[in-house]
Structure formats: C-alpha cells, structure tokens
Image (cartoon, rainbow, N blue to C red):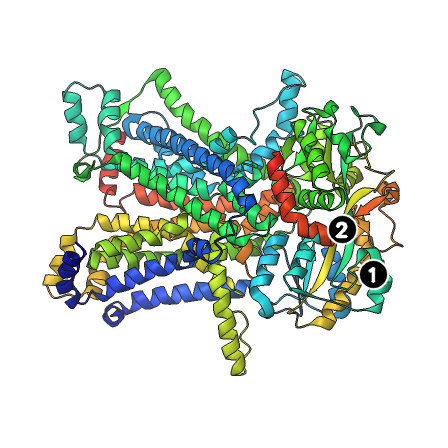
C-alpha cells in the first residue's frame, strides 16, 4: 500500500509545486507553529498531570461539554429560527431587523455578564424595584449558573449562525422551494423539510464557530464562576503554578473542540447540497398579518432589547455617573486609539496570511494543502491565555538570541518582539487566523476554478492570475475577514492581558481590571467604547453582505426589490 | 515569485505592505517610551498611584506602572529573564512575592533606612521583599441579623446557623488560596480540611468579588461572609450606616489572618539605586498615609489607620507564614477543589 503510494507520488515530485502553494502551506503551518508546544508538553513533562489536574478534569470536562452542547443547541435554534423568520416571512420592521440582528456580535460576552451582574445584584435598582413589587424574598433566577452561562453565550454568539444561515437562505433557489410547494407542502413545512436541510452546512459552520468561541471563552465564564476547562487551566496554572499541566489541559480542550467539529461532520455524513448553490431567484417571503406579524416583529425586538438595548442603556447610565466623578477621558482616548491600531494591524496581517493560504490551495489543490490549511485554523479553538503563552515562549527565546547577538556587536536592541506590540499581534494572528481564512476561503470557493485555467491558458502566470483575476473577485471576502478579525481583537482579553507591552492598556483591559473589583461604573465607559467601536465594522459587515458587493448580493437585491413592490 | 506581482500591481502591493508596516509602526509607538523606572504593579487599583507620582516629581524620575494580575506579571518576568525592563515587582499578596523569589526573579536589598521604616516582622530577613500594607482577611457579619459575639473564629462560619446564609468568594481568588495555605501551614491538613468541609456543609453562595460578598450580606442574601477588611472600610467611608461589621477571629488565640501587599527588587533591574529609592519612598510616612486612606493598614508603626476604622488597627493579627504557606499553595488549591469550594 505504502509502496503503491510512493510510486504514485514519484512522478508528481518531479514537477515542482507552484511557489504560491509552498508559501501558502508554509504560512498555514507558521500560524499554527506556536501551538505545537501544547501536545509537546505531554512529551517534555509526562508526569506533570498531577493530582490537581486529575481532580479538576472530570468536572471541567463535563462543564465544557455541557456548555458546548447548550450553546450549540441554543445558537442553532435561535440563529437558525431568526434567519428563517427573516428570510421566509415578511412582517413590519423586517428590513431593519435583518441587519440589526447581527449587532450582538459587537457585544463582548464579559460585558454582557458584568452588566447583568450589576443589574441582578442584590442592591441594584432593578432588584430593589422588583422586591418592592413582589416582596422582600423575591429573587431573579441566578445568573451564576450553568443555565446562565449557556444563555449569555448563546445570546452573544447566535449571530454566527444567523449570518451564515441568512446568507445560505438568500442563495437558495426559489425553484426548489416552489417544487416542494407544488408537491403539496405548506409554506411552513417547505421551510422545515426543504429549506432548512439545504442550509445545513451553513448552519453547522455557524454552530461550529459559536461552540469554539464558547469553549475558548474566558471572560464571561470567569465572571460567572462557571468551572469549564478554561477555568481549570487558569486554576492549575496560576493557582498551583503548574504550567505544563495547564498546557496539557489546554491540549485536551483543543481535542474536545476538534472532536465536536468532527462529530458534526460525521453526523452530516456524505450529504452534500451543491444544487443549492445554483443561482436563481430567492424564495418570496410570505407576508404575515395581524397578531402573527406583531409577534414576528416583537420577538426579535425583545431579544435585541435584552442583548443590546438594556446593557447599552445601563452602560451609558454608569458612564455618566463615572464622568460626574471625574473619570480620566484622556486615558480612555489613548486606550481607544491603541485598541483600534492593534485591531487594524492584526486584521490587515490576518487577511494577508489568509489570502496567501487560500490562493496557495487554489494554485495546486492537494490533500496536504487542505490539511495544512486546517491546521492553521486550530488557534481559534485555543483559549487566549494559552495562545499567549504558546506565542510568548518562542518569541522570548528569539528575543534573547537577538539581544545577545546585537549586544555582541555593541547594539542595545531591547526586546524586539515581546517588548513591543509585535508579540501581541502575532498572538492575535494565531488565535484569529481561522476567522480570516474561513471568510476568504468561502469567497474563493465561489470563484470558478476554470477562471484560473482560462487565464493560465492565455499565458498569465500565477502571480498575474492572483493580481488580475482573483484579487478583484476576492476583495469582499477579504474585507469580511478583516472586519471579523477587527471586532474579535477589540474584544480580546486574556492574550492581551499577558502580552501587552509597557506603556498602556487597551479598552478590554481597562474594562477587565475594573470588573474584577465590581467597580462597574469605572468599567462602563471603556466597555461602551468597545461596543460602539465594534458596531462600526459589524454594520459595515452587514451592509457588505446585503448590498451588491457579494455575488449573492444580486439575489439579495432582487429579494429587496420584491419586498418593496 | 513576487516580482511579477510587484511589477504589475506595484501600487497595490506597495500600498498594502506600507499600510501594514505603518500600522505596525504606529502601534509600536503608541505603546513605546523608555522610562527611568518600570514597576510591574499588581496594586494597580488601590489608589496609591499618587505615591508613585509624588516620588517621580520629587526626584525627576520618569516611571512606568504596568498593571496586571500577579500571575500575569510573574509569567512575564520569568520569560523576560535578564532582559526584563522591570525594576520592581509590587504584589497584593506575599505568596506571589515568595513565588517570584523562588523562581530567582528577585534580588535582596539592603538599606538602613528601610530597616528603620519597616518593622522586622513585615520584611524578609534577607531583604528580598518589603511589606507595603497589611490586610486582614476576616469573617464579616450582618449587624442586623447576627449579634456581635456570634462569630469569634473562622470555625464559626461552619456553624449550622449559617446554613444557606454564608457568602464566600470563588476559590480561584488568591486571598482565599493564601488563607487556606496558611491554615495548612499552621493547623495541619486534617484540621484545615475539617474546617473547610464545615463551611461547605453550609452550602455557601459563591460570589465573584469581596465587594459582592459585602453587598450580598447588606442586601439580606447572606448573614455572614469572609473578606479583606479594607473593602468594608472603603464602603463605610462613604456610607457609615452600611449594615455589615467585621467579626474579628481568634482574638484569644492566634489572631486574624493577615496578608501583606509588598514589593521586591527585580534581579534583572538596570536601575537599582533608583528602584531602592522608590521602595524607601513607598514605605516612608507620606506614602504610608496614602495607603491608609484606602482603608488598608500601614506597615509603618507610626501611621495610624484611617479615622473611621481606627479601632481596627488594635485587632490581634496573625501574619502569614509566607515560606510555608507559599510552599503549600498548590496543596491549598487542591484541597479547595476536593472539598467542593467552587
């Protein structure tokens, strides 16, 4: 068997693989490179997994699995239902809700949690008001619980499923749907039996993103004292000083994340839905009237009020209070500027890396390339703290070598990577490459490979094909990638905490430091800025996907025109 | 390979590369700066930045305070090694200084002035660390529902009268971990485990911060809790009628568990003289007064507690046995896990 493979590979080896493929594979492996330290910890410190980790592991694993299952089911139901509602029914406010439902993406989980804790805490105005109405013994359900953690993360992560599901519904051909109708299915049953199953790959991709985010979440889980794997990693490492055991726990977490994704693929089996991508006119949404229209509009509005409206109002109230107490606005402006610069820088580099990897795969599709590309996306499943350490260790080593070499030549170099923002940007790249790559690659998948063949047969080399054929078609995907990474970096907490260079904080850090002591009014202003700055790219993202910028936009426009008619 | 691309889309590529480099450069600059002294400051939220500012103004030293949790700062120090830009490490907890010392990250300081300013019990005999402030971790009681004599020791929090009425902070908090480690050092494993199990038998409500614990007691969700003294001191400074009071433990015995916030000189420091001058300044009278303004207790014997909590400085204290507690911290974390302290 092995001999046969080797023989089959032999003639191929004579043709050198295209430079872009080599570069793409290299970039993908480089991005994942620092994470190699995680499984290696089992080799270098085989005995590290001591009593504490053993004690913590069963409960933490159970908590993480429950969280993943809960958030998976929650985001699928909520995001899928909302996407179907907006795509297949017409009701007052639909056009507005279509994009507003993406806004929770700008709300970091830990901000939602601290607002909830502030409002739910015994002494808050809300609790006092409720107690004065319902009596002194009245209690709201505890936020610090399994259900609370699942609910909070579902509320901020459902947009992943919603966005991808909505895009899939927009691309679905009206013909398939109407064939189902003529075969006797009602509107509702046609959605359940035909449209939803056809959107399954997109919905599954959204759920996979949401679950990975939930598993790697640190801020919200920590504030809720939910003892998932990220909490166990933190405990073992910072409480018991046991870094190797922490890295081993992190390896298990990545394994859990990957096995959940694999499980989904297994369940999906061989089902493929290529037909769904054939372009056609989108399904005509059915107009709802009366109470049903009211209910269809009210439910999403209520959701947005809980996830965005009320928290922002509370943040504004606290901010006003804090400014009255003389909060330093200049610090905040500097923190904000730093945050935006870091996020912009990371977003630019992430898009560059993702484009190279995606184009490398396009110039020579191969199993190795696919595997390398997938390895590059692993960082998304790794908690920020662990990514930070994984990145820090090799960079610090490199820094010391460089400093020694420069010192020998009489140059005072300082710490080039770990002493500056460079290390932090590298960590963001490792952590969020998956988001950029998935966006760019999804766009690449819709560019017909025969375009490249045609351009090549006309004499263009791969560089020219990239510059003149692919880049002009790829840019919406690249922009989506940049915006996604930008928003995530703005919200990022644990890696930033560990790697931020001297000389200032980011907004997320400012929020976190104040939240740890329950000083919610101090945390409010930077939190509000994060949400406000995050809304800009989110709105751009939505506009991008709904106007003519995407190829599917043509369909979306027809869809919109029909609504107006 | 890139040459063709560069040739054809020179502007596009050059623009992209320039943009990335520019943003990278700016973000490096946005953090940049090379101060005279760098302090890794775990006490970033205690309002004593003023002491640093005053030192800077008096001596003309430019200073950079870098905040963060002790473990984060520790991890950085360890990775930076000899190339660290840090000169001082300030922590809110002695165990973290002990840990840094064990990892070889700190170096002793000898100064006659420091020996005079800081009593021997609040500094390391070899001069590796110096205390800045004292913080008592004590049971707290509701003044409305729990009479004054009802809690006289940590054991009383395990009394069945507090079943469902006890509030504790999470077990990944360093103050709780140090308390349990100190108990392991002084009471032994069996007694400490019995004590923690009696607390857990009361089904404690686990909250995220000491402030949350105090507010839960005030709001009637709990009758008793366990917090550092100055969190209550700060609240009482604004609201003297806040219905929570400390219940000082073991006043006929060992005294109340007392931890120290402290400072140590980083081994890799390039500015030792200035760093030692800063330690001296932080333990001198004006800086110690700033510390008491935050309701903490000063290490300097001649600086009294803040006026509204003056009586608290007469409480019998039991300073942490740092060497043994530091060594036992991993055991403490494991024990808290085993008894089910969330």
Image quadrant assignment for residue B154: top right
| Chain at tag 1 | B
Find residue B3 and report its horizontal and vertical position in percent: 25, 72
Find residue B247 and report its horizontal and vertical position in percent: 81, 34
Q: How crowded is mark 2: few (under 14 residues within 10 Å), some or many (20 or more)?
A: some
Viewport quadrant of the N terminus of chain A? bottom left
Residue at (26% x, 69% y) in the render: B2
Q: Is residue B172 shown to the viewer in this render?
A: no
Of the residues under marks 2 and 1, which one precedes in the sequence? 1
Name the outermost residue toward the left. Answer: A457
Q: In this view, does A290 lie to the left or right of A445?
A: right
Q: Is residue A475 left or right of residue A533?
A: left
Q: Is residue A371 shown to the viewer in this render?
A: yes
Q: Which element type, helix, strand or loop, lies under badge 1?
A: loop
Find residue A18 and report its horizontal and vertical position in percent: 21, 65
Query: Which residue is under mark 2?
Result: B321
Find residue A436 and report its horizontal and vertical position in percent: 35, 51
Q: Residues within 10 Å of mark 1 (few under 14, many from 20)?
A: many
Image quadrant assignment for residue B127: bottom right
Query: Which residue is under mark 1?
Result: B284
Residue at (16% x, 18% y) in the render: A184
């Amino acid at each position: 068997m092995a001999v046969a493979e080797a023989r089959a590979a032999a003639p191929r080896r004579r043709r050198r693989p295209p430079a872009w493929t080599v570069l793409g594979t290299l970039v993908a492996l480089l991005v994942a490179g620092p994470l190699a330290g995680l499984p290696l910890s089992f080799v270098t410190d085989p005995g590290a997994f001591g009593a504490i980790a053993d004690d913590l592991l069963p409960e933490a694993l159970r908590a993480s699995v429950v969280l993943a299952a809960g958030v998976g089911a929650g985001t699928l139901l909520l995001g899928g239902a909302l996407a179907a509602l907006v795509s297949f029914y017409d009701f007052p406010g639909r056009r507005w809700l279509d994009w507003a439902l993406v806004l929770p993406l700008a709300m970091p989980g830990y901000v939602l949690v601290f607002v909830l804790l502030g409002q739910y805490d015994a002494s808050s105005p809300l609790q006092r008001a409720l107690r004065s109405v319902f009596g002194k013994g009245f209690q709201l359900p505890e936020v610090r619980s399994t259900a609370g953690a699942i609910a909070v993360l579902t509320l901020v992560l459902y947009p992943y499923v919603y966005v991808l599901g909505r895009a899939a519904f927009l691309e679905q051909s009206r013909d398939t749907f109407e064939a189902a109708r003529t075969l006797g299915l009602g509107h509702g049953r046609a959605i359940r039996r035909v449209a939803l199953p056809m959107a399954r790959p997109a919905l599954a991709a959204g759920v996979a993103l949401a679950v990975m985010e939930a598993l790697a979440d640190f801020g919200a889980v920590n504030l809720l004292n939910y003892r998932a794997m990220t909490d166990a990693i933190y405990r073992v490492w910072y409480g018991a000083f046991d870094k190797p055991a922490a890295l081993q726990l992190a390896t298990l977490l990545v394994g859990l994340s990957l096995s959940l994704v694999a499980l989904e693929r297994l369940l999906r089996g061989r089902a493929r839905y290529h037909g769904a991508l054939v372009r056609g006119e989108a399904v005509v949404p059915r107009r709802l009237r009366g109470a049903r229209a009211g209910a269809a509009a009210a439910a999403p509005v209520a959701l947005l009020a809980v996830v965005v409206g009320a928290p922002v109002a509370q943040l504004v109230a606290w901010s006003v209070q804090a400014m009255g107490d003389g909060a330093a606005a200049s610090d905040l402006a500097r923190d904000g500027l730093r945050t935006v610069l870091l996020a912009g820088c990371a977003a630019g580099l992430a898009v560059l890396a993702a484009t190279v990897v995606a184009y490398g795969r396009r110039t020579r599709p191969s199993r190795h390339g696919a595997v390398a590309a997938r390895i590059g996306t692993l960082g998304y499943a790794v908690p920020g703290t662990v990514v930070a350490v994984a990145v820090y260790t090799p960079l610090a080593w490199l820094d010391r070598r460089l400093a020694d070499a420069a010192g020998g030549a009489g140059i005072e170099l300082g710490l080039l990577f770990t002493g500056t923002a460079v290390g932090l940007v590298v960590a963001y790249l490792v952590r969020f490459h998956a988001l950029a790559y998935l966006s760019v690659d999804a766009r690449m998948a819709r560019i017909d490979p025969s375009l490249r063949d045609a351009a090549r047969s006309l004499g263009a080399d791969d560089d020219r094909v990239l510059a003149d054929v692919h880049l002009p078609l790829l840019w919406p995907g690249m922009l989506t990638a940049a915006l996604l990474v930008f928003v995530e970096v703005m919200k990022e907490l644990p890696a930033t905490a560990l790697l931020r260079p001297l000389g200032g904080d980011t907004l997320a850090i400012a929020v976190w430091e104040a939240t740890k002591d329950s000083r919610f009014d101090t945390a409010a202003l930077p939190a509000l800025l994060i949400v406000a700055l995050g809304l800009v790219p989110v709105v751009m993202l939505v506009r991008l996907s709904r106007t003519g910028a995407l190829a599917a936009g043509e369909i979306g426009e027809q869809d919109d025109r029909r609504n107006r008619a | 390979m890139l040459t063709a691309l560069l040739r054809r889309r020179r502007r596009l590529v050059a623009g992209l590369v320039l943009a990335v480099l520019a943003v990278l450069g700016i973000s490096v600059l946005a953090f940049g700066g090379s101060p005279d002294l760098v302090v890794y400051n775990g006490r970033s939220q205690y309002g004593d930045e003023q002491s640093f500012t005053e030192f800077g103004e008096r001596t003309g030293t430019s200073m950079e305070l870098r905040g963060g949790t002790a473990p984060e700062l520790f991890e950085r120090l360890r990775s930076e090694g000899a190339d660290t830009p840090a000169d001082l490490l300030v922590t809110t907890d002695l165990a973290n200084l002990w840990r840094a010392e064990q990892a070889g990250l700190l170096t002793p300081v000898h100064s006659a002035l420091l020996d005079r300013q800081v009593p021997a019990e609040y500094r390391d005999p070899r001069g590796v660390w110096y205390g800045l402030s004292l913080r008592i971790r004590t049971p707290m009681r509701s003044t409305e529902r729990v009479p004054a004599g009802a809690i006289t020791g940590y054991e009383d929090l395990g009394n069945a009268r507090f079943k469902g009425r006890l509030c504790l902070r999470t077990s990944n908090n360093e103050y709780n971990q140090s308390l349990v480690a100190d108990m392991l050092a002084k009471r032994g494993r069996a007694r400490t485990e019995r004590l923690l199990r009696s607390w857990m038998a009361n089904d404690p409500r686990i909250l995220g911060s000491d402030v949350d614990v105090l507010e839960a007691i005030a709001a009637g969700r709990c009758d008793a809790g366990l917090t550092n003294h100055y969190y209550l001191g700060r609240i009482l400074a604004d609201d003297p009628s806040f219905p929570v009071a400390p219940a000082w433990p073991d006043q006929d015995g060992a005294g109340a568990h007392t931890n120290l916030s402290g400072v140590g000189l980083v081994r890799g420091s390039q500015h030792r003289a200035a760093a030692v001058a800063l330690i001296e300044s932080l333990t001198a009278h004006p800086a110690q007064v700033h510390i008491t303004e935050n309701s903490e207790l000063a290490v300097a014997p001649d600086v009294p507690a803040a006026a509204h909590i003056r009586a608290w400085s007469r409480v019998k204290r039991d300073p942490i046995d740092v060497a043994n507690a530091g060594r036992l911290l991993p055991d403490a974390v494991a024990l808290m896990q085993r008894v089910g302290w969330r």
